[in-house]
Image (tube, helix red, strand yellow):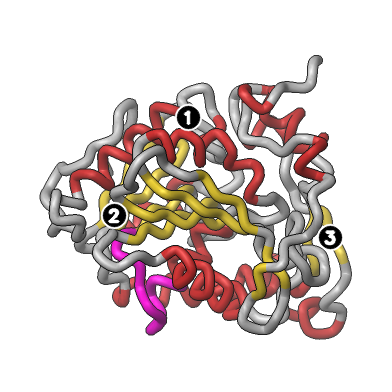
């Protein structure tokens, strides 16, 4: 099977893999690698992408280009311990280190009078959600892709994770991900496992923090006060589709399920349609004044999906 080109999937290139680590510092000095997609002309919104576990921001190349072509200024960064950013590989000392990094990057792209959007996929969606439910400076709009509010792992792993996270925090464990779970297009899985910046594994500490953050997010859902769009593949077996149903019960949240799509809806063949739907939803919540609009029932519906 041929290895796909970047035009076929959101992935890194050999040239990108050779890039030096970024000098953009996190709050504690950890260098964060930042990518940017600049809109032609004056942008009407700014958007920050937070990627998932074991991957990196370079896998959002197609998404970043599509959003920029729609007039949105886009940035993404490699989470600490991921991609070209600094820090121990796939490790985090505490979940709030991720939130600190998001706060720094949001502040870096915030422009007065222009709406600010926080977008997260998978673990990145959990980071974005817990950030939005915190008392930190909030974005204006939130987009969550496959947010993991439930763990699709055996119960014994959930019990063991916090113990290992304390007694053996740097032990590395394989992530239970198979290529076909990512997308229907087999090229996506080939690119994922061939990508030198992808780490299909995590430390015990990161796993423990992830499970703890799920509990934290579920306990804080009532604190979500900004308009939110949730997108989820109807055939997502990595992050159970049913796990995001609770978000649809919250005021100001619109949830869209795409029948037949797998975990990475943005990397499916229908990915450009998904991005177009996100742009449509954002525009529906950003009037000509540039400020977020109040949510209206049914506004910004995505194509090819199902309203939940």
Give the residue drawn at x 82%, y 70%. 88
Give the residue drawn at x 35%, y 73%. 138
Percent across and percent down for residue 52 are 61, 54
In this picture, residue 250 sits left or right of residue 88: left
Distance from label 2 to label 1 (Cα)? 22 Å
Write down the quadrant of residue 210 in the picture: bottom right
Q: Residue furthest front?
A: 41
Q: Main secondary structure of the magenta part?
A: loop
- Residue 202 vs 307, above or below: the answer is below
Say which label, 3 or 2, has the lower sequence index.
3
- Residue 119 vs 234, above or below: the answer is below
Q: Is residue 140 magenta?
A: yes
Say which label, 1 or 3, has the lower sequence index.
3
In the image, which disc is placed on residue 271? Answer: 1
In this picture, residue 297 sits left or right of residue 99: left
Distance from label 3 to label 2 (Cα)? 33 Å
* Chain part drawn in magenta: 130-141
Q: Label 3, on which residue?
A: 173
- Assess disc 2: are there few (<14), some (14-19) or many (≥20) residues with their C-alpha within 10 Å of its C-alpha: some
In this picture, residue 271 sits left or right of residue 285: right
> Is the residue under label 1 in contact with that under label 2 (CB below 8 Å)?
no
Give the residue drawn at x 72%, y 44%. 177
Q: Is residue 181 magenta?
A: no
In the image, which disc is placed on residue 260? Answer: none
Write down the quadrant of residue 93 in the picture: bottom right
Q: Label 2, on which residue?
A: 248
């Amino acid at each position: 099977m041929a290895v796909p080109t970047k035009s076929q999937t959101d992935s890194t290139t050999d040239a990108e893999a050779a890039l030096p680590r970024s000098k953009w510092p996190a709050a504690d000095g950890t260098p964060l690698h930042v990518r940017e997609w600049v809109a032609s002309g004056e942008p009407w919104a700014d958007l920050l992408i937070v990627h998932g576990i074991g991957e990196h921001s370079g896998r959002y190349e197609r998404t970043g280009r599509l959003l920029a072509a729609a007039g949105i200024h886009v940035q993404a960064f490699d989470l600490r311990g991921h991609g070209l950013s600094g820090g121990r590989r796939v490790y985090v000392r505490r979940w709030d280190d991720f939130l600190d990094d998001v706060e720094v990057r949001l502040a870096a792209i915030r422009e007065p009078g222009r709406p600010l959007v926080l977008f997260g996929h998978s673990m990145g969606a959990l980071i974005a959600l817990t950030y939005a439910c915190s008392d930190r400076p909030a974005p204006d709009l939130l987009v969550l892709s496959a947010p993991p509010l439930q763990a699709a792992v055996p119960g014994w792993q959930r019990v063991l994770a916090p113990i290992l996270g304390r007694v053996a925090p740097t032990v590395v464990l394989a992530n239970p991900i198979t290529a076909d779970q990512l997308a229907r297009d087999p090229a996506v899985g080939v690119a994922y496992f061939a990508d030198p910046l992808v780490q299909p594994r995590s430390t015990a500490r990161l796993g423990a923090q992830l499970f703890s953050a799920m509990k934290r997010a579920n306990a804080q859902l009532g604190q979500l006060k900004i308009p939110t769009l949730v997108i989820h593949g109807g055939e997502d077996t990595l992050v159970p589709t049913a796990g995001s149903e609770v978000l649809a019960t919250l005021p100001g949240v619109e949830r869209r399920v795409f029948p037949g799509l797998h975990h990475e809806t943005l990397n499916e063949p229908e990915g450009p349609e998904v991005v177009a739907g996100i742009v449509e939803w954002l525009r529906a919540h950003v009037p000509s004044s540039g400020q977020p609009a109040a949510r209206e029932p049914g506004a910004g519906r995505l194509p090819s999906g199902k309203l939940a």
